């Protein structure tokens, strides 16, 4: 797992968005038992390394936290929410390949 991925909780969610400044923040809502989440993980690791300094890649474990997931209406995982300047700007539900993930990230950089 990449050291560049930020693991966030209900308690750290808002401060993580604020500290990102104008960098886009990609929050992966996932759980350890979720097969598609595990398939997405290596692509997120690679993206965290590739976009270091340009974007913030975060993981939010829905088994350990629930307030932010509930507030954002997360019903299926994996779901990636994209924030820019603290505001929700887009989302993607379901797994995706590395090239699809990179293209998704590039839209916001």
Image (cartoon, rainbow, N blue to C red):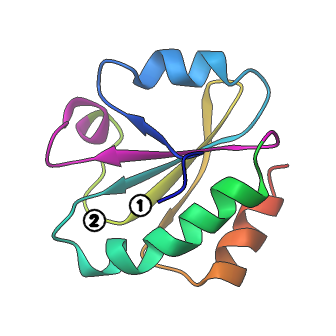
Closest to the observer: 31 or 76? 31
Numbered label attached to residue 79: 1
Q: Position of residue 31 (x, y in %)?
A: 23, 59
- Residue 67 shown left or right of residue 98 in the figure: left
Count up the numbered dots: 2
Q: Give the answer, above or below, for where 105 lies relative to 69.
A: below
Name the residue located 82 percent from the left edge and 43 percent from the top edge: 54
Numbered label attached to residue 95: none
- Residue 53 shown left or right of residue 36 in the figure: right
| Label 1 crowd bin: few (<14), some (14–19), many (20+), radius 10 Å | many
| Label 2 crowd bin: few (<14), some (14–19), many (20+), radius 10 Å | few
Closest to the observer: 79 or 64? 64
Q: Is residue 100 magenta?
A: no
- Residue 19 shown left or right of residue 55 in the figure: left
Q: Is residue 62 magenta?
A: yes
Name the residue located 29 percent from the left edge and 26 percent from the top edge: 10
Q: CA distance from mark 2 to mark 1?
A: 7 Å
Name the residue located 56 percent from the left edge and 64 percent from the top edge: 44
Magenta part of the chain: 53-70
Secondary structure under badge 2? loop
Check if mark 2's residue and mark 1's residue have beta carbons within 8 Å: yes
Q: Which residue is mark 2?
A: 76
Closest to the observer: 100 or 54? 54
Q: Give the answer, above or below, for where 65 lies relative to 14.
A: below
Closest to the observer: 37 or 49? 49
Image quadrant in which you'd find residue 88: top right
Q: Position of residue 64 (x, y in %)?
A: 15, 40
Image quadrant in which you'd find residue 37: bottom left
Secondary structure under badge 1? strand
Q: Position of residue 28 (x, y in %)?
A: 44, 54
Name the residue located 82 percent from the left edge and 61 percent from the top edge: 106
């Amino acid at each position: 797992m990449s050291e560049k991925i930020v693991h966030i909780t209900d308690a750290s969610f808002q401060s993580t968005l604020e500290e990102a400044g104008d960098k886009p923040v990609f929050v992966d809502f996932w759980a350890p038992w979720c097969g598609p989440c595990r398939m997405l993980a290596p692509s997120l690791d690679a993206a965290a390394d590739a976009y270091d300094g340009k974007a913030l890649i975060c993981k939010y474990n829905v088994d350990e936290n629930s307030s932010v997931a509930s507030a954002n209406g997360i019903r299926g995982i994996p779901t990636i929410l994209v924030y820019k300047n603290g505001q929700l700007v887009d989302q993607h539900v379901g797994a995706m390949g590395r090239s699809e993930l990179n293209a998704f990230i590039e839209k916001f950089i």
